[in-house]
């Protein structure tokens, strides 16, 4: 490339003409913009403010999972349908495809992800792609690739293009040596699953990029999330979703956790609202990069009792899954989320009775519609 060689020579002559005897590093010219994999130690990144555009342009990775579709609906109502792009490696259903922009995106394909961000002028990136706890333990190499290598791609692209980056964490980011009742924001973590390890890694890498480069990284530790419009995805807390489907369909439910296993839980509407609230929170309000959020904690036995107030014929048996039980026993029993409530005004709306009433109504209506069709 003669032009670049000539520019290099001119630059060297200009430096030498100033009489400086210092050794300067070689100048490398690239046809593409700089790579975040070769970050300058003096680099600084700042997310675009709303003054620069009317609404954020949002990309959601792993968008066909439990949370992505619901969050896309919420964000589209607020920012406009065409400003929110769902992405995944799976084919969407017809209703998801026609509800707003959808694009194929593999987070392990750095070039593909980078092109999507550039071509669609993305300003916020919400990174939901991950293998959950029980699924990850069944395939550790894949979980390591998706949850860690994929995260690195997202971090680098967010840094390069000045994005506001949201990466969820989890109750699974804590381990058996963590205080469990309650579990504060800052304490010993040391999880025992690849899912948990990868989430601690995400929290620390995001905080590092924020302090080192000024990147706008935001993270919430989700409790177990309960929703009716998606099927359980292999998480340890998914019994609290499956029970509603089985109760309405067969009035029989087999639980894979002990009846006294207490875990933090949250209805999906609260979870999605919390995510939007932290994304919109003014930067000066955020004293931390990662916050616990919580709504309620309960055991399978307590959940069954509440469901039976509406469906008295529900029969429940327990067949303990050793892997999931060991995971649950290492997780928090209750989350301390006072920092989120103090710093940016987090407040949940659904308690256990409201959750059960809402879930049963949803599942019953969905089953009646299916039978009618």
Image (cartoon, grey):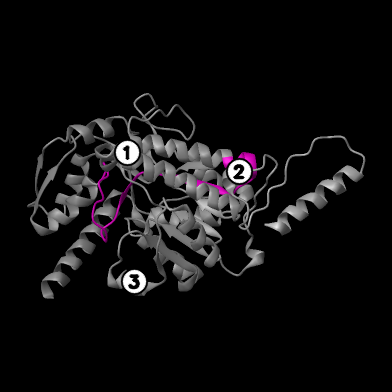
The answer to whether residue 344 is seen in the rendering is no
- Residue beneath label 3, please? 97
Check disc 3 and report its element: helix, strand or loop: helix
| Crowdedness near tag 1: few (<14), some (14–19) or many (≥20) residues, C-alpha within 10 Å | few
Residue 236 inside the magenta-drawn segment: yes
Q: Nearer the viewer, residue 127 or 249?
A: 127
Residue at 20 percent across and 41 percent down: it is 300
Q: Position of residue 5 (x, y in %)?
A: 73, 53
- Residue beneath label 1, please? 141
Check disc 1 and report its element: helix, strand or loop: helix
State the CA–CA distance, disc 2 to disc 1: 26 Å
Q: Quadrant of the C terminus?
A: bottom left
Q: Quadrant of the N terminus?
A: bottom right
Give the farthest residue toward the front.
2
State the CA–CA distance, disc 1 to disc 3: 31 Å
Residue at 48 percent across and 44 percent down: it is 152
Relative to 197, residue 49 above or below? below
Q: Position of residue 132 (x, y in %)?
A: 31, 44
Give the side of residue 219 with respect to residue 160, left or right.
Answer: left
Kindly report which numbered mark, 1 or 3, lies closer to the viewer in this rendering. 1
Q: Position of residue 286 (x, y in %)?
A: 58, 46
Kindly report which numbered mark, 3 or 2, lies closer to the viewer in this rendering. 2
Residue 38: mark:
2
Give the side of residue 238 with respect to residue 204, left or right.
Answer: left
| Crowdedness near tag 2: few (<14), some (14–19) or many (≥20) residues, C-alpha within 10 Å | few
| Crowdedness near tag 3: few (<14), some (14–19) or many (≥20) residues, C-alpha within 10 Å | few
Check disc 2 and report its element: helix, strand or loop: helix
Q: Which residues are magenta?
A: 209-237
Q: Earlier in the sequence, mark 2 or mark 1?
A: 2
Q: Position of residue 278 (x, y in %)?
A: 51, 52
């Amino acid at each position: 490339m003669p032009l670049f060689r000539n520019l290099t020579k001119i630059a060297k002559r200009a430096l030498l003409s100033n009489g400086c005897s210092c050794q300067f590093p070689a100048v490398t010219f690239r046809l593409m913009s700089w790579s975040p994999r070769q970050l300058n130690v003096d680099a600084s990144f700042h997310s675009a403010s709303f003054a620069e555009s009317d609404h954020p342009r949002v990309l959601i990775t792993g968008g066909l999972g439990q949370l992505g579709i619901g969050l896309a609906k919420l964000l589209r109502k607020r920012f406009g349908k065409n400003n929110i792009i769902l992405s995944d490696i799976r084919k969407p259903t017809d209703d998801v495809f026609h509800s707003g922009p959808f694009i194929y995106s593999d987070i392990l394909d750095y070039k593909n992800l980078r092109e999507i961000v550039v071509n669609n002028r993305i300003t916020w990136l919400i990174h939901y792609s991950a293998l959950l706890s029980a699924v990850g333990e069944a395939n550790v190499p894949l979980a390591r690739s998706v949850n860690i290598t994929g995260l690195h791609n997202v971090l680098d692209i967010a840094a390069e293009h000045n994005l506001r980056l949201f990466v969820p964490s989890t109750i699974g980011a804590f381990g058996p040596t963590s205080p469990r009742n309650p579990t504060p924001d800052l304490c010993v973590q040391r999880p025992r699953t690849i899912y948990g390890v990868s989430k601690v890694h995400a929290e620390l890498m995001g905080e590092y990029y924020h302090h080192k480069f000024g990147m706008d990284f935001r993270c919430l530790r989700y409790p177990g999330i309960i929703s009716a419009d998606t099927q359980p995805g292999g998480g340890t807390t998914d019994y609290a979703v499956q029970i509603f489907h089985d109760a309405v369909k067969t009035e029989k439910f087999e639980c894979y956790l002990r009846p006294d296993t207490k875990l933090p839980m949250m209805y999906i509407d609260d979870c999605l609202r919390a995510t939007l609230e932290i994304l919109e929170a003014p930067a000066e309000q955020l004293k931390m990069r990662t916050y616990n959020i919580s709504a309620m904690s309960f055991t399978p036995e307590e959940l069954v009792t509440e469901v039976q107030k509406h469906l008295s014929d529900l029969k429940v048996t327990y067949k303990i899954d050793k892997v999931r039980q060991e995971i649950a026993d290492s997780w928090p029993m209750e989350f301390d989320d006072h920092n989120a409530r103090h710093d940016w005004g987090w407040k949940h709306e659904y308690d256990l009775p409201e959750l059960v009433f809402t879930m049963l109504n949803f599942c019953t209506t969905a089953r009646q519609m299916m039978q009618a069709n």
